[in-house]
Each structure stands twice: as C-alpha cells, then as structure tokens.
Amino acid sequence: MKKFKRISVLLLAMVLVIGLAACSGNKKANVGGNAANSESKKPSAEAGAIDTSEFVKISYVILGDKPKNGQFDAALKEVNKIMKEKINAELEWKWVEWADWQTKYNLLLASGEAIDLITIGTDWLDTWGNAQRGAFKNLDDLLPKYAPQTWESIPPENWAQSKYDGKIVLIPEDAYTQWVNHGFFYRGDWAKEAGITDPIKDWDGMEKYMQFVKDNKQGVIPWDSQGGTSTFGGWVQSYTGNLELPLSTGYLPVFASKSEDEKYTVVSPVFEDTMINFAAKMKSWADKGFWREDVLNYKGDTRTLLKGGLTGVDQHHTQTFATLRVDMDREQPGSELQMYPFSRTSGNLPELSITHGGTSLGAHSKNPERALMAYDLIRNDEKVYRLLNYGIEGVQYEIKDGKRVRPASYDPKQHEFYSDFWGGRVDKLEIPSDTTWDQVEETLYAEYDKIKKTYAYGQFVFDKTPIEAEFAAISQVTGEMGPAITYGKAGDPVKAVEAFRAKLKAAGYDKIMAELQKQLDAYKKLIEG
Amino acid sequence: MGTTRTKIRSDVSSNLVRGFGYAFIGVFGLICLLPFLLVVGTSLTSESSIARNGFNFWPRDFSTFAYKIVFENPDLIIGAYWVTFGITIVGTAAGLFLVAMTGYALQRPDFQYRNGISFIIYFTTLFSGGLVPFYLLITQYLNLKDNYLAVLLPGLMTPFLIIMMKSFVRSIPHAITESAKIDGAGDFRIFIRLILPMTTPALATIGLFIAIGYWNEWYHSMLFLSPDMQYRPLQLFLYTVITSADFIRSSSAASNVELRDLPLESMKMATAVVATGPVILFYPFVQRYFIKGITVGAVKG
C-alpha cells in the first residue's frame, strides 16, 4: 500500500508537470529546436556557384480545394519540366482545403513540419502571429542570392513592410493590381429608365433607383439580399473618414480608426450618430419593401437572381464586379451593369495591403535555397507563370488580340483550371481575360487612382491575447443583433441601436477600446519612430 | 386467457395519458423526420426554383440534375463509404476488445496497481493537452499523417467507456475468476470464455457507442488526412462539399478567391441524401439489437 501511494504521488506530479507544460506550450510552439540553426548543408554556396546537383522536391502550401479533374496536374507537369531543366527541382502543391482551413493552416505552421513555400496574408492568415511564433525563415541573406529577380523588382519601402522584428519574413504580392473595395451593383438600363443618367454617387441615389424598380418592375425584388451580408462597413466608408482596422468583430465592424490624419486614434462608428443614421435609413428601406420580409432567414443567392433578372441590386467588391459585368452582358443583354463603390461618396479609399497576398518560407524547410529559386521562376518566368496561373495554352486558353479567350473545345467541367496561386502575381505578366470587363481599368480603377491612399496598417500586429474573451463576446453580439438592425427589422432604429450599444458595453467594449488604443499608440511609435 | 382475451380495464385517465403519449411521440418523430424530408425535397428541385422560392418539402420544379452531377464521380462516394465502413468495423472490434480487457483488468482485486492506473485514465478526462500537442504527437512522433491509423487510434479507447465497462464487470463475482483459476485456466481463457459471455449487454452498448463515434468521425480525418488522399471518410467528404461552397460564397477575408461555379444548393442536398440513404435503409434491421443492448446496460449498469 505504501509503495502504491508513493508511486501514485510520483505519477500525479509527473502528470501535472506534463499537463502544465502542454497548456503553456501552445503559446510558443517552436517545435524541433530553433529554426535559425538549420543552416544549409552546403558550404559551396559561398563559392559563388549554386550547387544544384541533387534533385529535390519543393512543396508549396496553397489555400483551396484540390482540383479533381487533373488539369492542374497536367500544367504542373509542364512546369516541372522547366524546373528540372533550370534548377533540378520539382514543385508540388500542398492544398489546405476550405473546410476548417484556419485550424489546419495554423497547425501546419505550428507543427514544425518541413514545408518550403507557403501562401501568406497579413490581414487574413495571421501572418504576423505566425512570424512571432517563429514559423518562417528569415530571408534577408537568401533573397539576393537565390531569388535575384524578385529581390531586384521589389522596392526597399515594400521590403520594409515585409519585416517582422527587423527581418524579412515574407515576399509581398506588391506588383499586382486588385481592388477589393465593396459597393453596390445596379443595372444601368433600369437606372436610365428611372432618369438616373449620372453614375450613382450616394445611398440616396441607390434609394431612388430601388424605388423605381419597386414601382415599375413586376416580380422583381429591388435588392433580394440575405441577412448574412452586412453593409454597415460600406455605410461607414461612404459617410465618414473612418479607416477600417485589420481585425474582425464578426458581422459588422465595431472599431475603426478616426481618419487619414488621425489614423492612430480608435473610434467606434457604432457609438456615433453614424450607426443611428444607418439604422434609420435601413428601416426606411425595409418599410419601402426593398427586400423580402423574411430577409433574415432567407437563403437565396442574390447574384444568381441578378443574372436571372429577378433582382436589381447586388453588393460585393470591384473584382467581382469586373467578371459579373461580363456575365450580365451575356445573360441580360443591354443591362449595362454599373457599380457604385462606397468610397465614391467620401473619397475614403485605402489601397489593399501589399501583404494581403505573398509567400513565406517555412522555418523547417530542408531546401530553402532551391525553394527560393523555384519561387523566382514562378514569379518572373513568363512560361512558368502562365502555366501556373492560366493552365495550358490551347486547352485552357488561347490568345486573341492580346486577350485570353476560351478555345472552342473548352468544356467548363472537364477543363476547368485553377491553382489558387496568390503568393506573387505580377501585372506585367498578366494577360487580360475576356471574362473580365475590359473597361474596368479606364473607369473604376482610374477613379480609384485619383483618391486612393496608402494602406496604413500593413505592419500592425494586433495582439488578441489580453482581450480574447471580450473579443469573442463582441463578435457574438454583432452576429446576434447586427442583422436585424442592418435590415430594418429591429423596430424603432434609435431604440435598437441603444440596445445594441448596451449589449456591446456589457460584452467588454470599453476594455477592448482601451487595449486597441494602447496597441495603436505603440504602432505609431514603430512607424513614426 | 384461452379464447377470450382479458382486457385490462381502462379508465379515462390512463386513456388520456396514452393518447397524450402517442401524440407527443408522434409529433416528436415528425419533427425528427421533417429536416430530412426537406433535404430530399430540395435535392429534387431545380436550382432556379430554389433561388426563387427557397427550400421546400415537395419539389415545385422537379429535376434530377443534382443527382446527375453527384453520380458523375460515383467512385468518390463509394470509396468514402468503404473507408468509413472499414474504419468503423476494425475500430469497433479492436476498441471493444481493448476496452473490455482494460475494464476487466482494472476490476480484478488481485491486480496491484489498478487504482493508480485507473487514476491516470480518469485524469485525462479532466485535462487535455490541447490541439497543438495532439497534432504534433500524431504527425511528428507517430508519423501518421495521411494514414487511416491517425483516425483509428485516437478513438480506440475512451476513458468514459472504460469506466462504464469497469462498473459493469464489478457486478460479476470475483469468485468466478478464482474458481476458474483453481481449475487451471489462464487469464486470457478466463476473460474470453467466462467474462466476455457474461458481459454481452455491456459489450453491445459500448460497441454501439464506439461504432457511432467512428461512423460520425470527421474531425480527426479533417486534421490528419489531406486532400492528397484519394478516399477519405464519408462524413469528411460531406463536410467538405458543404462548407467549402459556403466559405467561398460568404468570405470577404479571402477576397482573392475567384467565384467559380460552386456546388449548388440542390447538389449539396443530393450529396447528403446519397451519403445517408443506405444507412437509413440498413438501420431498421439492426435497431432492435441496439435498443436491447442499451436497455439491458441501463438496468444492470
């Protein structure tokens, strides 16, 4: 019995120690020793010539569902012929599918598996958090030698935005134009009928248009939306100078920064008249019947309905608009789909962060040199670039008058191709496609170029840890009460907003506010020195 | 008895209770059935009708298009079925044997360290190492990534089931084991020839729990089986079909994602029907065994 007691006490102590170690261990899951120690095995690199005598496999972690029709594999095979010949290596795509991608992506990085290249995005893939946990190799010494073209083509100020703790940890996708600012899409032909000849430039213009649709188009719901889409962020963009912060409070943004001039001051549009005005406007839209009575439970797909001529408005970002316009010209000839970007009213338009897409190198990569050489080819070699982004010429596309078009033999199911490569596309190697509206540059992009402002929060590393619980609670509240306010189904707007604010306060709004301000003050020091 | 059946005299109140019971259970059964009917109805509706009228129990605009798409790659679903069946059968058999052995051994009074070991097993029900260490164990130390064992092993022994088995074995007198020992039987023979037959109700219950666990298992498959594998368990297959479409449609975070032609509502539902249909057909025939096991287990345990 005595013996048993001693053993169980020992065991208990052991278990407790292990348990505690495991609990605190997920903060710094730097498994397999220190990343910096994994120096390359070949000292010959110093001799100037790069040794590629040994054939290696390079993995590239990509977000997306693995294509099932074999078209991607065929293109990758062609790429690997070039890779073999130029750098004696072979690429393989490692897909992280959308089902629970966040968990899997972060686990992959935390596990210390030997991954080479990996897609990153500072605003949606927790890249700074992972850098903090030592998941990426630092690239300062490797880049000039092994990815010279990439190194040359990216200006120093952009490298500066790719640093964590003074070390380059990622290669930004900084030479690719894409606009993901949101706005309303509406039909140009119906707007003309309504007597709206100039492009719509505010929400009142949208109201006028929707009222016309309501009154004159039988069987059409002006904006057949569903409760899952929030437009409050758009309203804030239209009627204030507030800037969006790189953190999500769920259904609608509760926090923002004050303005371009005071970008380090936290404000909350929810606690200003902004929200009251928005709620009142949405209530009036609901009462006018611009959407369904059961909008909050409705599950229809607005975009499909728009293409079917059953609704007159849709809401998404510019990139979506550019392809939707082409679809609409085909499905609803003469519809002349237009976009009213929310920024048009106020001129409040930050550029997309250059680190919204990009590529990093896993800390435990076995062949960092060859991985970077492969990346240099993907980003700069025209042949490789086209194969990986567009597929095989003659199967997936043909070039006609400088545009990518589908070959006659193209069958959408059989030949569909995507690689989900978002880690370093460049405008100069892009071929415009006939599925993208060819006037988007001269119209919307040109308008944006006049008002765009540099993105201010590219290096802001939001640390959630001190306010994790409050943050979760706030997101819960926005998801619970946001939809009803957004679609005017919460009764008296002023009362509804007040109730919403009270709930947010109870969920820990003030604590988050203080913490955010503290972090932005620190960020200001970092940026302005 | 004989030719005339004696009727138990029924008064108003017991009739009332009975009527209420039937009504309640009937309504409850209907509530359980309705979602499934909705799925079936929607899967047979054309996509444009869903967009216009939403889901419905009775297809307004009948179409089998979704099933055509689903059965374009029937081997994926069939493969998923095989994987799930395989894991469930192997896992249940092995898991049941291990749990029974553990439960029995921990109950033997002549086993010196039984309390210490029991404590270690209970302890894990209170604290868990967390996801990251678990992931590391499976992928780095056991090297089981993309291996069906990664799904099979974690479900083999559940502390709760071991406790259940242990408390059941407690009702069998230790004298049986001792007398068998005197007759010269070894421990394994005692366990297999004497103990197991006496614990069949418990085995049925525990086996059911393990089997349901494996059949519905998708989380470990999601973590450890990458898309590079040709066939993955059924539930994960379903989960990916449904979530990825939702994700791409609703997410503005990954605004890089091009909106490709996504699996449509009707197709999701058709996949769900194909994946659950055979089980529904198969279930009524085995249900009575389950119920027996659970009730007996409840009375005894």
Image: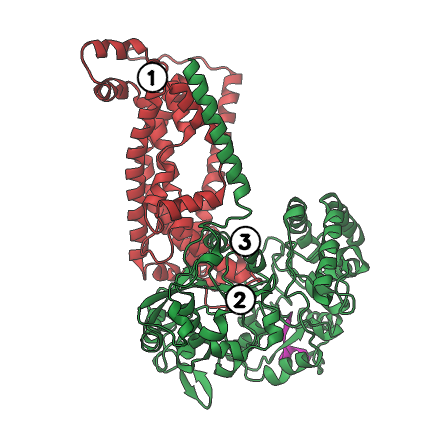
Chain colours: A green, B red
Residue holding disc 1: B111
**Chain of the residue under the numbered disc 3 shown in the image:** A
As measured in the structure, the alpha-carbon distance from the residue carrying label 3 to the one carrying label 2 is 14 Å
Is disc 2 on the same chain as disc 3? yes
For this rendering, which residue is in front, A370 or B15?
A: A370
Which sits earlier in the primary sequence, circle 3 or circle 2? 3
Which segment did they paint magenta?
A182-193
**Label 2 crowd (10 A; few <14 / some 14-19 / many >=20):** many
**Amino acid tagged 3:** Arg
Tag 1 subunit: B
How far apart in space, not on screen, are marks 2 and 1 (Cα)?
Answer: 58 Å
Instruction: Determine if marks 3 and 1 fall on one subunit.
Output: no
Image quadrant in which you'd find residue A6: top left
* Residue A422 visible in rendering: no
Tag 1: Cα neighbours inside 10 Å, few (<14), some, or many (≥20)?
few
Identify the element where label 1 is drawn.
loop
Q: Tell me where residue A305 sits by quadrant.
A: bottom right
Q: Are marks 3 and 2 in contact (CB under 8 Å)?
A: no
Residue A262, position as x, y percentages in the image: 78, 66
Residue B96, percent from left and from top: 31, 30
Say if the magenta span includes residue B132. no
Dot 2 falls on a residue whose secondary structure is loop
